[in-house]
């Protein structure tokens, strides 16, 4: 996977839990129109399996279903930007991040990330219903 997620905390408002993740990029971009797929499952192998890393082991909410709402809070990737691509039948491993170059053109399939994209990060939020 070309996107690595790290758990960055959580918040809650009106029975909705917000999970925050920091996304970093490596390798080459995924498929034009789909983006790079992210893995929202907790990592069992310090991120080598593509799952969410959490060195402090605070990622105690294991998602049993994908979030219906995700968004981008902050982008520090050299003028590029991303959009969350939730497919018609989302799973914990098929939600995409579509990368756009400065100016609005999506990266080509398998295109190399720029140095700024590789050095930067994006903060994502996933909204899930709190347990009652």
Image: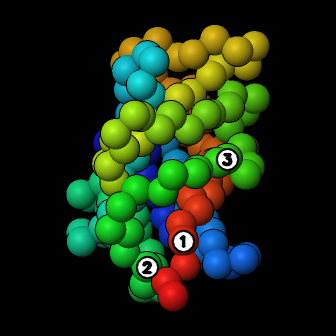
Mark 3 sits on what residue?
72
Residue at image location 59% in from the left, 62% down from the top: 127
Q: Quadrant of residue 34?
A: top left
Counting from the top left corner in percent of width and height, residue 90 is at 37, 44
- Quick one: SS at disc 1? strand
Look at mark 1 in the image and give the residue it sits on: 129
Tell me residue 51's x, y (percent).
33, 60
Q: Is residue 32 above or below residue 25?
A: above
Can residue 7 be seen here? The reply is: yes
Q: Is residue 28 visible?
A: no
Left/right placement of residue 50 relative to residue 4 reads left
10 Å neighbourhood of mark 2: few (<14), some, or many (≥20)?
some
Question: CA gap, disc 2 to disc 1?
Answer: 11 Å
Q: Residue at x 75, y 13 (%)?
A: 103
Task: State the residue in front, 69 or 46.
Answer: 69
Q: Residues within 10 Å of mark 3 (few under 14, many from 20)?
A: some
* Quarter of the view holding residue 21: bottom right
Where residue 30 appears, as percent x and y from the top left, is 38, 26
**Callout 1: few (<14), some (14-19), or many (20+) C-alpha neighbours within 10 Å?**
some
Indicate the quadrant containing the N terminus: top left, top right, bottom left or bottom right.
Answer: top left
Q: Which mark is residue 61?
A: 2
Q: Mark 3 or 2 closer to N-term?
A: 2
As measured in the structure, the alpha-carbon distance from the residue carrying label 3 to the one carrying label 1 is 19 Å
């Amino acid at each position: 996977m070309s996107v690595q997620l790290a758990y960055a905390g959580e918040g809650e408002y009106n029975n909705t839990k917000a999970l925050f993740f920091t996304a970093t990029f490596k390798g080459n971009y995924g498929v034009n129109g789909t983006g790079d797929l992210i893995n929202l499952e907790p990592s069992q192998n310090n991120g080598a399996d593509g799952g969410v890393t959490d060195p402090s082991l605070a990622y105690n909410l294991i998602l049993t279903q994908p979030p219906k709402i995700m968004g981008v809070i902050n982008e520090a990737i050299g003028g590029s930007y991303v959009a969350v691509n939730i497919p018609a039948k989302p799973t914990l491993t098929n939600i995409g991040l579509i990368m756009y170059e400065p100016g609005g053109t999506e990266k080509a399939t398998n295109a190399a990330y720029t140095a700024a994209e590789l050095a930067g990060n994006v903060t994502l939020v996933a909204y899930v219903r709190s347990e009652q």
